[in-house]
Image (cartoon, grey):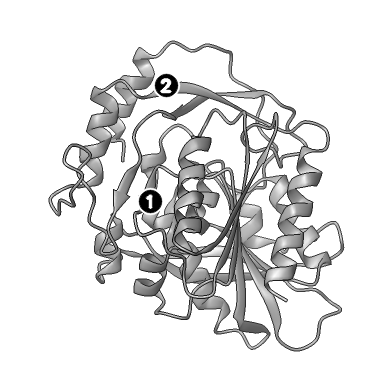
Amino acid sequence: MIKAAVLATILLATPATASPAAPLPAVSSADFAATPTVLANGARGELVTFESRSPADWGPAMHGDAGPAVRLNAQFFRPAAKKGRVAAVIMTPGSGNLGTHHLAEASALVSKGLAVLLIDPFRGRGITDTIADQGRLTWPASAYDVLAAARYLRTRADVDPARIGALGGSRGGTAVMMAAAAPFSDAILGKGKGLRAVVAGYPWCGTQFRSARLAEGASLLLLQGDRDDWVSVQQCQDAIHAMIVAGQDATMRIVAGAGHAFDRADVPSPTRIPDAVTSTIFPTVYMDDAGVYFDLATGQPNPALRPEDFTGYVVSGGFLRKGVTIGSRPGDADRFVKDMTDFLATALD
């Protein structure tokens, strides 16, 4: 991950190409932790907390070193018309944390008869966001949060433990996608206890398990726009293609003309995020099923490699750039919500 001092140097050396954009529509983390949210369809949230961990890297987490414990805030929304145990969807946000689009999507899912656990992965860690520095929170920690949320949901008498899915966009999309990867899911939850259905919206696919296996019985839908300039569409295509070749239930739908975060109906496209640092041209980093990275130069697994080795390569090679765009055109958010709710409602039926 990018160290703060290195990142600060990059940011200071990179001229701003646009004035700062207006603040994005957001949900207060403090309010979310203290006051039940009422969704557009009338569903009222239940305040909950659950324990997660903050692993430093994939391999250590998979071998029992999941890092320090952290207590995360969440709200649980249940469809009023449903009786007994219900299917549930874990929702986890992207780099900007909770936004109004998450509430809209939670409302759409609850209206489809699915319970929703909407989590805040940042407040419990003392983080506001990771827009300008993704290194504030490791990628394994984000994926671990999803599996920790699944573990929590299995303790609830009103949730069907065999019908738990997940939804995330951007960093959250990466989190749910990696949480559905068989090597990580099996190591953290155990084989056969993973997510059943996952929708990953416009994720970063820069690190992948080379075996491309999903957790047992899982299905995956990836939704992305072809004008995304924050993450690489091609890396995600390669990830889904590898899963299909491996016989996994994975699908990718590319939306013509859509950019990053095209489900944010109240953020017009293109809205510039000048502080975001990214790279869409750095080579994909692969791991074996034990979480050992493959050396880009030799093509062989090398247990000595660490995330900072790749970070150093990204920086020294000049792969980073500053400034991205996000937002939704008329109809983009509606399409995202329809594709997402249809998929999860069918897969978790």
Q: Quadrant of residue 307?
A: top left
Query: Which mark is on residue 208?
Result: 1
- At label 1, the amino acid type is Gln
Closest to the observer, 117 or 298: 298
Residue 249 is at least partly visible in this image: yes
Query: Which mark is on residue 167?
Result: none
Query: What number of labels is visible?
Result: 2
Residue, x 54% and y 51% (percent of image)? 172
Helix, strand or loop status at disc 1: strand
Query: Which mark is on residue 321?
Result: 2
Residue, x 38% and y 74% (percent of image)? 186
- Residue 255 appears left or right of 111: left
Q: Quadrant of the N terminus?
A: top left
For disc 2, the neighbor class at 10 Å (few under 14, some 14 to 19, many from 20) is some
- Residue 317 appears left or right of 154: left
Which numbered disc, 1 or 2, marks the residue that appears first in the sequence? 1
- Residue 281 appears left or right of 103: left
Q: Position of residue 25 (x, y in %)?
A: 70, 38
Closest to the observer, 270 or 7: 270
Q: Quadrant of the C terminus?
A: bottom right
Question: Is the residue 85 above or below the residue 53 in the image?
Answer: below
Q: Residue lying furthest left in this view?
A: 304
Residue 106 is at least partly visible in this image: no
- Distance, label 1 to label 2, CA atoms, is 22 Å
Q: Quadrant of residue 155?
A: bottom right
Question: Is the residue 41 above or below the residue 331 in the image?
Answer: below
Helix, strand or loop status at disc 2: strand
Q: Position of residue 253 (x, y in %)?
A: 65, 46
Q: Position of residue 153 (x, y in %)?
A: 57, 77
Question: Is the residue 297 above or below the residue 45 in the image?
Answer: above
